[in-house]
Structure formats: structure tokens, C-alpha cells
Image: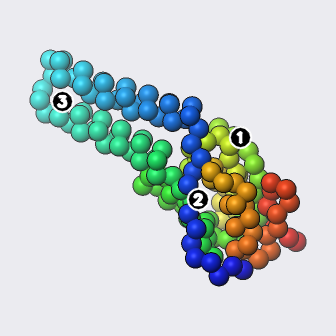
Amino acid sequence: MSDAGPVVYPSKRDIGIAAIVWAAATMILLAAGSLWAAPVSLAFRLGMSALSAVSTALLLWVLYGTRYTLTDQAIVIRAGPFRWTVPQESITEIYPTHNPLSSPACSLDRLYIRYRKSRFGVMVSPKDKAAFLADVVARSPGLKLEGQRVVREQ
């Protein structure tokens, strides 16, 4: 077990995912702006503008605020306001994947973390996958690195 302090690994960001998020944010703001020319009440315009601003901020916060903090006890995953905690001792396996399902990962170059207490696990996309995997193994007795895969020793 390591005695190192917490280490933060930022998420890798694919240009394609970033472009989709920015396009969605732009469309939300353009739609809100177009309401100001529509024959609707001021209260509706203000409400929809506020909702659009919050939605856009949330999208961009998730895109630029996704990171993974390794402590000696857990992997703490943050994606904007959302947070997951994966206890180190519960990790059973970590392996590379390009699964496109929703996850706190801003790239399709992902690592799937399978752990007890979760039926589905979680996918992450640290910018430096090799250092992330080595650090997880160093902090969790019983895990070993096999190529790009981490497994729990039996």
C-alpha cells in the first residue's frame, strides 16, 4: 500500500465528444435567444433563458470538470456536480474498453472498473491510463497489473 497523498488524473477529452457538447450548448443558447422574438410572455422568456443557461453550464462543467482522484482508500470520480466513490478494496478488475454508454468519461478511450457493490461498474477515461493503472495497483494490495488490465489476485 502506498503512503502517497491523493493524486488527481484529469479525463482525456475526445475532440468529437467536445464538439458534440459544444454544439449542444450552442443550440440550447440559440433556441433560448430565438424566444426573445417569439410572441410569448416575458416570464416564459426569462424562465427558459435561465433554464438554458443552467443547462449549458452543466454540459460544460461535466466536459471540463471530469477528473479522477486516487486516494489510499478509494477512487473518487467527479464529472461536474456528479460524484462516484469506488472503494479500492472492492475493485475486482479494470480493463480497456471503447464502450460508448454514458459514463463519467470524456473520451471513448476508456477503462472499465468492475467492483463489488455495483452491478454495472463504471467507465473512466484518464488522460494517462498507464500511470492511473500503476497508481491504482500501488495503492491497493491484492491488485496486480497484467498488461493494460488490472486484476485482483485470488
Residue for badge 1: 98
Locate the N terminus by quadrant: bottom right
- Decide which of 28, 68 is in the foreground and name it: 68
| Residue drawn at point x = 67 percent, y = 71 percent | 88
Q: Where is residue 95 in the image (x, y as percent from the top left)?
A: 77, 53
Q: Where is residue 42 in the image (x, y as percent from the top left)?
A: 11, 29
Q: Distance between the residues labelled 3 and 2?
A: 40 Å
Please, what secondary structure does the residue beneath circle 1 have? loop
Q: Position of residue 74 (x, y in %)?
A: 61, 70
Task: Identify the residue position indicated by label 2 in the image.
Answer: 9
Front residue of this view, candidates 119 and 136: 136
The residue at 82%/67% (across/down) is 144
Q: Do the residues labelled 2 and 1 touch (CB within 8 Å)?
A: no
Q: What residue type is labelled 1?
A: His
Between discs 3 and 1, the one toward the N terminus: 3
Labelled disc at residue 11? none
Q: Distance between the residues labelled 2 and 1?
A: 19 Å
Residue 101 left/right relative to 84: right
The residue carrying mark 3 is: 45
Comparing labels 2 and 1, the label whose residue is closer to the camera:
2
Label located before the other in sequence (3 or 2): 2
Q: Decide which of tag 2 and tag 1 comes sooner along the chain.
A: 2
At label 2, which amino acid type do we have?
Answer: Tyr
Does residue 124 appear anywhere in the picture?
A: no
Secondary structure of the residue carrying tag 3 is helix
Q: Is residue 66 above or below residue 93?
A: above
Q: Tell me the distance, in whole angstroms, between the alpha carbons under discs 3 and 1.
A: 41 Å
